Image: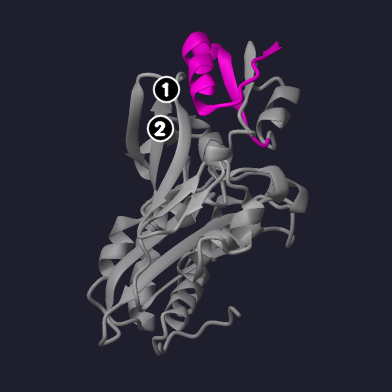
Amino acid sequence: MKVRRVTTTEQALEALAEHGSAAQPLAGGTDVMVQLSRNEISPDVLVPINDLAELSTVETNGGVRVGALVTHETLAKGALGSGYRSIAEAAHTVGGWQTQAVGTLGGNICNASPAADTLPPLLVHDAELELRSSGGSRTLGLEEFLVGRRQTRRAPDELLVSVGLTPGAPRSGDVYLKVGRRSAVEVAIVGLAMRLVFDRNEIVSKARIALASVAAVPLRVRAAETLLEGEALDGHLLDEVSAAVLGATSPIDDLRASATYRRLLVPGLVRRAAGVCARRAGVSSPVEEAYQ
């Protein structure tokens, strides 16, 4: 296996165009190196991109654009601001501090794990991905980009260069909740992100709900979002929302948990997340939540 050294994005794109599917971009390496050691992937050429400075920036003027090489550590420290707390919370749960220090947002996206922590928060913020090749660039919504477990719509000659996020809104709150078998260095049994925007009458004007570890890819639940929009939060409504979320999931049994256990977790996570979103939006809510 060869290593193709590059110092600019243009050089990286040239390498990917030349080698195609035989090339593997390498950023933090927290997923790629494990997969190499397990013989799960076998590229002919590694293309390290971790030194491409233009992909390591965060832009917050107007909209928010996050470079693909921004690390989980940077996100966990709140680089995106208070309107994106779910992303910071998710980044804080990715592996241990060593992983967070070198692991990148773009790597987490392109690895496309069903349990990827950052993907549900990105989905609730309507993330759009900029993919670039030597022939040009295109934009895809994250939901469209994800095809299956470790399967995406990235072409072999393309590089994910940035992630665009919906601008923050007043009277809004978001959160990422994760259930694991321990509190650190743990793959999610279930991960749930929610973002709610309220009007002046404390009615939900916009809702986003997304989950990890309950299907082949992290997914948004539009049916549940529709139930929330135009309504005030109450326990009965959240029972209906929980049922809609459960109807969209297809969890499996694995070493971490059974499908039945994953389903049992969902209603409590939905209720807890709604309460957190309301509190963070400055909205009074009859929904009880203990999340601090």
Q: Quadrant of the N terminus?
A: top right
User: Residue 266, can we see it?
Assistant: yes
Residue extending furthest toward the left? 230
Task: Compare marks 2 and 1 and give the one earlier in the sequence.
Answer: 2
How crowded pointer 2 is (Cα within 10 Å; few <14, some 14-19, many 20+) is rated as many
Identify the residue at image location x=40%, y=32%. Answer: 131
Residue type at mark 1 is: Ala
Residue 103 vertical position relative to residue 77 in the rendered view, above or below: above
* Nearest the eye: 156 or 168: 168
Residue type at mark 2 is: Leu
Q: Is residue 22 magenta?
A: yes
48 to the left or right of 184: left
Cα distance in 3D space between marks 2 and 1:
9 Å
Disc 1 designates what residue? 155
Residue 131 bears which disc, if any? 2
**Contact between labelled residues 1 and 2, with CB atoms less than 8 Å apart:** yes
Q: Is residue 69 magenta?
A: no
* Nearest the eye: 263 or 75: 75
* Nearest the eye: 68 or 85: 68
Q: Quadrant of the C terminus?
A: bottom right
Which span is picked out in magenta?
A: 1-28
Q: List x then y, in percent, for residue 166.
A: 35, 58
Identify the residue at image location x=35%, y=29%. Answer: 137
Identify the residue at image location x=29%, y=68%. Answer: 206
User: Residue 38, can we see it?
Assistant: no
Between circles 2 and 1, the one closer to the viewer is 2
Q: List x then y, in percent, for residue 10.
A: 49, 23
Q: Secondary structure at mark 2?
A: strand
Q: List x then y, in percent, for residue 149.
A: 51, 34
